[in-house]
Image (cartoon, rainbow, N blue to C red):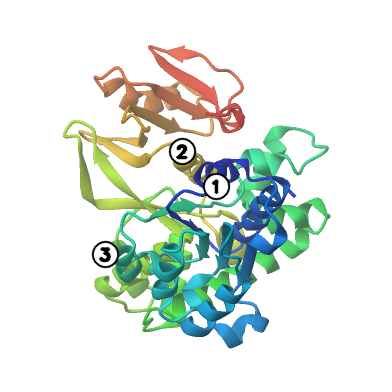
Amino acid sequence: MIKREQYLSRLRNLRDTNLIKVITGVRRAGKSTLFKQFQKELLASGVSAKQIVYLNLEEIENRSILDVHLLNDYIMKLLDKRKKNYIFLDEIQIVPDFERLVDSLFVKNYIDLYITGSNAYFLSSELATLLTGRYLDIYVSPFSFTEFLSYYKNYFSKNEVLDDYLHYGGLPEVSNLLHGGQQREVSYYLRSVFHSILEKDVMNRKKIQSKTDFENVTKFLFDSVGSIVSPNRIAGYMTSTGNKIDNETVKNYLSVLCDAFLFHKVQRYDIKGKKLLQTLNKYYATDIGFIAALLGKEAKADKGHLLENVVYLELSRRYKEVYIGKDAEMEIDFVVKDADNVVSYFQVSLTVREPNTLERELRPLLAIRDHNPKTLLTLDPDEPMHNGIRQVNVINWLLNKP
């Protein structure tokens, strides 16, 4: 089992602070495992097992206490009010009126509270209003390439492992299946996860007019990672194939897909105007393994766009803000801001060995007149400088700790 050190370090720092620790992320990304890893650390630090309460509220044995009052009574009977108690509530969003329970537990000084949810709905409206300034959201993503690589004991090359990562994605159980030599089971597993997300985090929580249309929009988006898309474009395409759908419905479906953590919506940033643009966004998949699993040989997303998706996910782990960039008529793959609001620029290409390709990829970066860091990421092994622009092998970059 891989220790998710990036997230464990944050939980250590936040332990016993007067904040609710809210762990979010797509299903099967490892939120429950993170809880278990942190609980082991608590026990190792001297916390007794009686001071730790863990409930997975989706387990059938807990269905009888999903009423907010019954659940509160059940938890309170387990606590020793003379000591600090660590409460872990997994998939809290399935409890009706859970906001009231969370608020009630939080105000007790002998409770340190940790909760998880697999969709963004429970962080909106009522919970955010009730607990403003009293919770901190920790988003857990599937395995990074570094974590994925750690499962490989023997491999011909890191490029070979990257090809697997681009095909199978980074859900932890996928790595377990690959490590056990069960590659054929991966697509079945990923499809089951996807349909579980649809049933538990989409269909039961939002009014979806047509499940078929929703799945078609989802597949279109998976096949368009790295491309600029809009509700108009998707609606036009689907209508042209005989599935008439209006722009507003598509817009709603895109919002639902992001709320279920299947996709990240990335806005365009006007570099000269230093402002966000409201149109022509990109959507990147939270886990690119879904693409091959759901679309198979019909997938049109090429390796270049899949690599761009992987770079986006890594940038979102390392930087506070990530955008796609626009400078006059030119497009920059990514504009990022760190914790100090320092801006950096990234361009992604499979290879720039052809002079025309190199010139095309460098042109947008060279046109930017500021002196902020500019990086060209490729699969080429060489790492030269181009008028102040660093060319870096993308695998080296992915494995280099920020």
Q: Which of marks 1 and 2 is nearer the N terminus?
A: 1
What amino acid type is highlighted by mark number 1? Answer: Leu
What amino acid type is highlighted by mark number 2? Answer: Leu
Q: Is residue 29 visible?
A: no
Q: Which of 262 and 329 is in front in this view?
A: 262
Q: Which residue does the image show at 48% across and 79% down from the upper left?
A: 95
In the image, residue 20 lies at what x, y percent? 45, 57
Q: Which of marks 2 and 3 is nearer the N terminus?
A: 3
Mark 1 and mark 2 residues within 8 Å of each other at the beta carbon: no
Q: Within 10 angstroms of label 1, few (less than 14), some, or many (20 or more) residues? A: some
What amino acid type is highlighted by mark number 3? Answer: Asn
Q: Which of 340 and 272 is in front in this view?
A: 340
Give the residue number, with chain letter if any, for mark 3.
Answer: 232
Count of all numbered marks drawn on residues in the image? 3
The disc label shown at residue 315, or none: 2
Give the residue number, with chain letter if any, for mark 1.
Answer: 11
Left or right: 347 as drawn, with respect to 23? left
Q: Which of 323 and 381 is in front in this view?
A: 323
Q: Within 10 angstroms of label 2, few (less than 14), some, or many (20 or more) residues? A: many
From this view, report whether residue 91 is shown above or below residue 360: below
